[in-house]
Amino acid sequence: MALTCCPPRSPDLTPCDFLLWEYIKDRVFVPSLPVSLNEMKQRITTAVSSVDEDMLRSVWTELDYPIDICLVTKGSHTEHL
């Protein structure tokens, strides 16, 4: 297995982990918490179904800037401003 200098999923390039996933978690893990696997699946399905065009546009907007920085710096390490 080849080692790389960077993790395979840089948090700088995964706004879904921060924006979209937080949105989903906020709708799944609300009191009272799911008591069964079926209830958990239903909550996840409902939460994902509630994602609309505006939310996806926000995710894309959050991703656009880090991608531009990555392209301009040719993938070198950068710090968030």
Image (cartoon, helix red, strand yellow):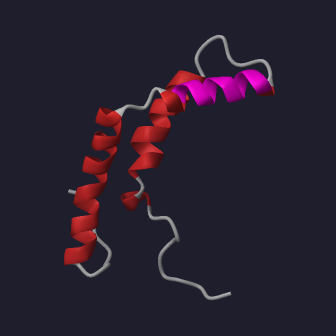
Instruction: Please tell me which residue lies in front, 6 or 68.
Output: 68
Q: Residue furthest right?
A: 36
Instruction: Please tell me which residue lies in front, 31 or 37.
Output: 37
**Residue 35 relative to residue 14: left or right:** right
Task: Give x and y (percent) for residue 80.
Answer: 26, 58
Residue 74 appears anywhere in the view:
yes
Q: In which image quadrant can residue 45 be found? A: top right
Q: Is residue 43 magenta?
A: yes
Q: Residue, x 27% and y 82% (percent of image)?
A: 74
**Residue range (magenta):** 38-47
Quadrant, the C terminus = bottom left
> How many numbered markers are drawn?
0
Task: Give x and y (percent) for residue 67.
Answer: 28, 65
In the image, is residue 67 above or below residue 44?
below
Specify the principal SS of the magenta part: helix
Quadrant, the N terminus = bottom right
In the image, is residue 2 above or below residue 43?
below
Residue 79 appears anywhere in the view:
no
Q: Is residue 19 magenta?
A: no
Q: Residue furthest bottom?
A: 2
Q: Residue, x 77% and y 25% (percent of image)?
A: 38
Task: Give x and y (percent) for residue 62.
Answer: 28, 49
Q: In which image quadrant can residue 43 be found? A: top right
**Residue 5 relative to residue 32: left or right:** left
In the image, is residue 72 above or below residue 57?
below
Q: In which image quadrant can residue 54 be found? A: top left
Task: Give x and y (percent) for residue 50.
Answer: 46, 26
Q: Residue, x 51% and y 71% (percent of image)?
A: 7
